[in-house]
Image (cartoon, rainbow, N blue to C red):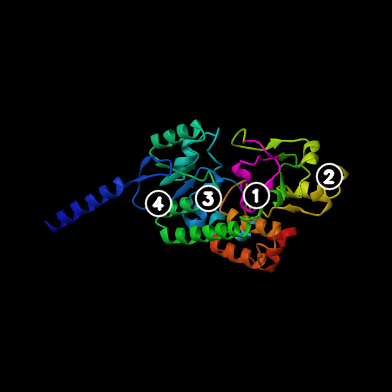
Amino acid sequence: MLRFFCLIVALLLTVSGAQGRTITDMAGRQVQVPDHIHRVLGAVSPVTWMIYALDPRLLAGINSALSHEDWDYLDPYVKALPVMGGFGGTRGVNRETLLALRPDVVIFWGWNRAAVNRRLAQQLEGWGVPVVFVDLDRFDRYGAALRFLGDLLDREERAEQLAAYGERALAAVCAATADIPDDERARVYYAEGMDGLETEPQDSFHAELIPLAGGSNVHRGTLKHYRGRDKLSLEQVLLYDPEVILVQENVFFEAVKTDARWQKVQAVRDGRVWLVPDMPANWFDRPPSFMRYLGLQWLAHQLYPKRFPLDLKTETREFYKRFLGTAPDDEQLKKILGSAG
């Protein structure tokens, strides 16, 4: 009789665990997920980085391969994970590849952005894989996203620590730069692409750190499509004549110093062309990740060192230790910061 009773209890517990719990994701959808989640996939890199910050050992795969140097700043566990690519936007999902990774949940970003993401979510749910959406559309939503993921993944305390850090950093930068008159804000051009002739308009989330850090994006207009990367001519950049150029690609960063055509731009003449640090992920954008918390402080300090004084090396080391789990040594800091250090 006792053995029968124990068997019934065990079966009930199994059924209860299988039923899981119902949560409301950041798109307002009701989703049933396991009570305890152990294996997670991020559909795109920004989501995967958020999961990594909470606990890298929750990841069942990563979206893209990293360089040899990038691995120096990450948990060794992640290096052995399969590279699965991303499955947002127009990319499809291979059923066998996905199910072989045995995810307890797949986390997407972009419910309101593209119908294809909603179709992909329905497809995955048809295969028995729960899909949860987070909101990373704006930088000031990162804290809420971290807290939501912390609750979902049973990492509430960790999530609160990271979100609180980010919100303190944002508040400190805003307090330091809020009273700068519009006509005194540094005029900034964000140079993307190998030739530096792609950029983002003022309302693009890809470049939202510029106004948050107290700068003024010289490229006006509205975001034409979510990917961004408006094409410009050099003549247009000359008309903008920015005081500062932020650079994504090292190729352009090296070339612009000696290109006679760019010497007509004030930022180049004044030596205010700054390469955005990007180890192990970019501090500014592509992907827009939690590294932006550090990138915002870096940019505010670069633009207004007296208004926002910062011991960049110390802050970088502490940030990497807090979010990535590694504390760079002096030589690594030189590589990370490059010309910014």
Closer to the camera: disc 4 or disc 2? 2
Asked if marks 2 and 3 touch (Cβ < 8 Å), the reply is no
Q: Earlier in the sequence, mark 4 or mark 2?
A: 4
User: Within 10 angstroms of label 2, few (less than 14), some, or many (20 or more) residues?
Assistant: some
User: Within 10 angstroms of label 1, few (less than 14), some, or many (20 or more) residues?
Assistant: many
Q: Earlier in the sequence, mark 2 or mark 3?
A: 3
Q: Which mark is residue 262?
A: 2
**Relative image position of residue 203 (x, y in whole percent):** 61, 41
Residue 234 horizontal side relative to residue 324, left or right: right
| Identity of the residue drawn at 51% across and 54% down | 52
From the image, tell me which residue sits under label 3. Answer: 140
As for residue 208 lying within the magenta part, the answer is yes
Number of numbered discs: 4
Q: Which mark is residue 210?
A: 1
Secondary structure found at label 3: helix
Closer to the camera: disc 1 or disc 4? 1
State the quadrant of the C terminus. Answer: bottom right
Q: Amino acid at mark 3?
A: Asp
Cα distance in 3D space between marks 2 and 1: 21 Å
Secondary structure found at label 2: helix
